[in-house]
Image (cartoon, rainbow, N blue to C red):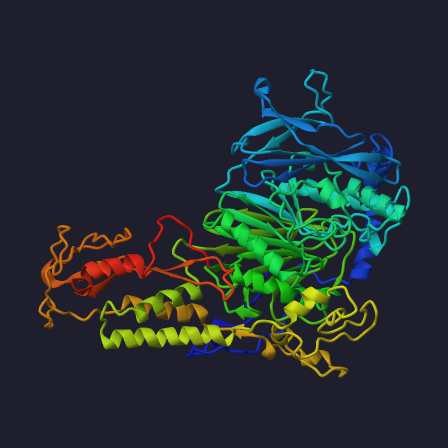
Amino acid sequence: MRKNKNILKKGMILAAVSTMVVTMAPAIPAYAYGEADSKTGQAAFNAATTGSADYQSWLTGTWQGGTQDFANTNKIALTPGSTAKDLGFAWYSKTKGTPAVMVWKDGSKAGAQIVKGTATDISAENWQGEVYAASNKVSINGFFEPNTKYVYQYTDNYSDNGDTVWSAEYTYTTHATDTFSVILTGDPQIGASGSKSDKEANDMSVAQDAYNWNKTMQKTMEIDPDASFLLSAGDQINESNAGSEEKKKKTRESEYAGYLYPSVFRSLPIAATIGNHDKDGSDYTAHFNNPNSDDNLGSTGAGCDFYFNNGNVLFISLNSNNRNQAEHREFMKKAVASNPDAAWKVVVFHSDIYGSGQPHADTDATTNRIIFAPLMDEFDIDVCLTGHDHTYSRSYQVQDGNVIDYDLSKGSVNNPEGTLYITTGSGSGSKYYNLLNYTPYYIAERTNACLPSFSTIDFSSGTMTIKTYDYNGNKYADDFTITKTTDAQSADEVIAAADALVNSTDVAYTDESMEALKSALASLKELKASGTTADDPMVSDITTNYGTANDRVKGYGSIANDDDKDGAKNRFKKGISTLLDKTIYTQVAEGKEENLSDYSTDKAPVVKGIDEAKKAVVSAINALQVKQTAPNGNQNGNADQSGNGAQDSTNQNGNGAQGGAGQQIAGNNAGGSGSQNVSTANTGASKSDSDGVKTSKSAKVKTGDVNHGGMYAALGVLGAAILATVLGMRKKGKFWQK
């Protein structure tokens, strides 16, 4: 299977790494997994579904007959709790009572725990005339152990008198948290088959989409039977306007019957992000019991941001329908603080910002880029998972709108800068879009083969691997892996470490070694600064005027395809946004037409040589030489190193001198010569943004085992203290974030 080439060949890297390099990128041909015409592809897929004997049998025997699942809007949904020990439950009932869940370890019902919840008044009705009066929610916290099978039942109205009517028994199996997997889907958008909804009883769009959605979920369990939960990138249903119109409200509830139909959801928790087709209806909140959402940040009519932790992975779900960047920042700060040592930070929201589907990737997605992309950079997010495009795409590593140059020919990247952006395809096949008729510079891979698709994501302490399939189990995209090592540092961390050494006046290094460090540091700083975008002037405008007549960016895009919905030639004007001025890299005057050829790849913002520049700084730190000074002030390269732990003004232990903050300096005494083998040097310099939102992050530099002749003869007590206090203490076994 062909692997995609990196935008920039390693052989093209310029010798100088101190500047941002803009380099010609080759045109990317069609991918092995297919670039289809969405109209013909959609028609073929619809015909294949409705013409299937299996579908027709299911439609009449199960969906509309038998159990009549088209009327069951009240199916229970599990949701992840704050941690893997917790679990949420939500379901509808026709009467309001005291909801409760009874749960026990498989085979140990005698030890069952009963947990009561809350019931909220609702007024919900589907097209089949089923009326529901309450949304029930129960949260069970601190109960679930890893790798254990549980059984649960639930009730609409618990009674202490022993006459409670319980549901059927269902199972829920927990998994390990150090190594685990999740399912990723996007845009099942139940009811949208063929980009339409019947909005009437016995809606065939809902039936078709529920059938294919169920097939997708069945295949996910065949591919990944031990998945811990489902990540949904939004648009669970299709009817986007809840309104007061009964027809619309009934349609939404019938679509939820289709979304919750797969039986796997009685055992697989759903972390459902709010999409633009979910954003208006309170039914979203009524159907799901999301954790850590009490502060209501990032809210619309449907709900708000939420987060949860599973082992050493932090998952953050943002409501991208809310464009208040300050609220999302406040929420992300809180989420990150809940797991400051998380090995991986994953963000999910609906609107793609670095995708490749038309008409979204060149219109509203670019607007949302202004709001959300800076947050991904600010909080060092490893991967951002989005939907909305109904096409699959994987980006290069992106930071501040720049593609960071890495060789991706092996389908992996090690200790990268920036964020990986994944845009999901359709989970049900209800709607497909064409790919943009140009390939954005940030796209590493894309496909819109007109079949439902899903991804699995495998997490461990050191790797994250994304695999993507269609609902037949065939590969839909190339596998991709991010690997991080425990000593990984970002460019910002390396810069902070070097600055601490350069600015210290407590240790005298040789002029030659310090000048080498300063030179390497200046190159790295210049490289970083060259790709940095100033604060965006459009953030406040978008937040304040979104959805109003004064929304200056509504409907603007980088380029219009021939089949653009309104036929308009949408344009972003130069100067409207500093980030868009960079990332939509052909800028035109208002009203001017442009040709597709104007989107030449030599205008793409690409940062080359960041790894080389970081390595150069670390090497310079390793090569630092301390001026050798005897106790009387004279040059003396043979200062006494006792090697026995003694420590005074003239003698320095060469094996484990202890700093004031507990910093242990490893090394082997080399006798009286003053030679010291240094294992690591770590800085405690923290980085924060101007408004104090950025969480403190200690910079750490792995310097390797480098022989510094006589270095610790001069460091002495001061040196140990400096490394302990000026330079931060290394936490063994922790995972340093990029």
- Side (left or right) of 736 relative to 165: left
Percent position of residue 699, x then y: 39, 60
Number of numbered discs present?
A: 0
Percent position of residue 291, x then y: 61, 42
Closer to us: 333 or 57: 333
Q: Residue at x 68, y 18 (%)?
A: 160
Percent position of residue 715, x then y: 20, 63
Closer to us: 158 or 224: 158
Figure quadrant of residue 93: top right
Vertical position of residue 152 compared to residue 696: above or below: above
Figure quadrant of residue 30: bottom right
Vertical position of residue 623 compared to residue 485: above or below: below
- Side (left or right) of 87 relative to 405: right
Figure quadrant of residue 63: top right
Vertical position of residue 22 compared to residue 213: above or below: below
Q: Is residue 628 visible?
A: yes
Closer to us: 641 or 118: 118
Q: Is residue 479 visible?
A: no
Residue projecting furthest to the right: 200
Closer to us: 306 or 624: 306
Percent position of residue 606, x then y: 54, 73
Vertical position of residue 415 compared to residue 613: above or below: above
Q: Residue at x 59, y 22 (%)?
A: 112
- Side (left or right) of 451 relative to 687: right
Say which quadrant the N terminus sits in. Answer: bottom right
Q: Residue at x 50, y 43 (%)?
A: 311
